[in-house]
């Protein structure tokens, strides 16, 4: 038997960082808006006789092995800490081989790690018959990631991996609520360009610094997040109406407030990209995730795509072709013989 799971990454449009508890409790109507993209993460589990556990990361080109689960649990440092922490949670009674992969560049800001955890926990959930709901897997995945990066994590990153499409994640005292936004995905695809700067960043640390400033009572950070909340609420409405002029205005405004919260969110290359693509026909730009590198999203007029992409490449960044991923995580179970034949 072989269990294979695949989950898409995401691009955020507005409201990021508000999804970290307890920030959203201080901003009425907090919401984040994002969409799943067809850059996928994957996890495959092949159960094996005995107790030996082997793990391979395709994108990191890294492998490790343990004689047993007990040996894995004794280790304090792991070559693949994310996979090890997932295994620590599920604790399978028998041996297996786990292989993971991600089409997202490292530190890109499009949530490759969060999507990968959803893919892996979904695969283990199916293999072991744990019976966790998808929403419970989100909670488990979020807690596992926090243990690995050692700072609080937000919830929005998991929902595109879970459900695909374009999403609004509402946040209030009653909890976290996911809603699909009814928008023509092909219309959205015509209007976005994603670029990778080649410089990874650590979103957990960047977000934690801003979160601490908010909790410590920074009035400036509180004001900026109040503005970001209003922008995210308006962005949801603009996307629902397919009002792209308003969406572009809001994207520019959100980027301005984020730079006030954390000046290090931008880099000289990101600033050059914003300037050169604007001249080429982009109508708005913002860094994905917490910034400091990673990916940059550009909202464009459809006829300007070729010019914008050439401007991005001229600055030394890489255009990442994307489409809206219509579906979230998928899990398949098949015999090992069929899996080997297919490969």
Image: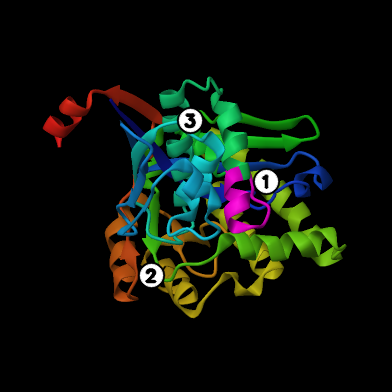
Residue 107: x and y, percent?
A: 46, 62
Count neighbours of disc 1 (C-alpha within 10 A) and say few if under 14, some if 14 to 19, many if 20 or more.
many
Q: Is residue 207 left or right of residue 4?
A: right
- Disc 3/disc 2 C-alpha distance (Å): 28 Å
Give the camera-side residue of 173 and 302. 173
The numbered dot on residue 192 is none
Work out which residue is located at the far left of the displayed protein and give it.
341
Residue visible at 56% across and 38% down in the picture: 89
- Disc 3/disc 1 C-alpha distance (Å): 17 Å
Residue visible at 79% across and 65% down in the picture: 213
- Counting residues from the start of the chain, the first of labels 3 and 2 encountered is 3
Residue visible at 68% across and 63% down in the picture: 257
Quadrant location, the N terminus: top left
Residue 36: x and y, percent?
A: 44, 40
Position of 104 relative to 119 (above/below) = below
Q: Which residues are magenta?
A: 144-156
Give the labeled residue for mark 2.
Answer: 198
Give the labeled residue for mark 1.
Answer: 19
Q: Is residue 24 left or right of residue 11?
A: right
């Amino acid at each position: 038997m072989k269990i294979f799971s695949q989950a898409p990454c995401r691009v955020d449009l507005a409201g990021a960082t508000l999804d970290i508890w307890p920030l959203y409790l201080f901003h009425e109507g907090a919401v984040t808006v994002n969409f799943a993209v067809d850059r996928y993460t994957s996890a495959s589990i092949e159960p094996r006789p005995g107790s030996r556990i082997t793990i391979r990361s395709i994108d990191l080109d890294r492998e490790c092995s343990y004689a047993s689960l007990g040996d894995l649990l004794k280790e304090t440092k792991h070559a693949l800490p994310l996979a090890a922490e997932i295994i620590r949670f599920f604790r399978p009674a028998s041996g297996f081989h786990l292989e993971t992969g991600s089409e997202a560049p490292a530190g890109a800001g499009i949530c490759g790690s969060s999507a990968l955890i959803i893919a892996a926990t979904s695969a283990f959930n199916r293999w072991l018959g744990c019976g966790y709901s998808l929403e419970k897997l989100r909670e488990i995945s979020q807690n596992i990631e926090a243990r690995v990066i050692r700072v609080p994590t937000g919830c929005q990153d998991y929902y595109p991996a879970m459900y695909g499409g374009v999403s609004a994640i509402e946040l209030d005292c009653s909890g976290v609520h996911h809603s699909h936004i009814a928008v023509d995905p092909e219309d959205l695809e015509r209007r976005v360009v994603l670029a990778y700067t080649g410089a990874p960043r650590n979103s957990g640390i960047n977000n934690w610094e801003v979160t601490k400033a908010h909790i410590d009572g920074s009035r400036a950070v509180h004001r900026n997040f109040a503005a970001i909340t209003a922008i995210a609420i308006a962005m949801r409405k603009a996307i629902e109406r397919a009002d792209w002029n308003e969406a572009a205005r809001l994207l520019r405004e959100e980027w301005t407030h984020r730079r006030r919260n954390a000046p290090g969110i931008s880099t000289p290359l990101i600033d050059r990209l914003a300037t050169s693509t604007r001249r080429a026909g982009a109508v708005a730009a913002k860094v994905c995730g917490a910034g400091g590198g990673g990916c940059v999203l550009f909202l464009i007029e459809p006829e300007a795509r070729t010019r914008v992409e050439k401007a991005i490449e001229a600055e030394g960044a890489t255009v990442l072709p994307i489409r809206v991923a219509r579906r979230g995580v998928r899990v398949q179970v098949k015999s090992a013989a069929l899996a080997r034949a297919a490969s």
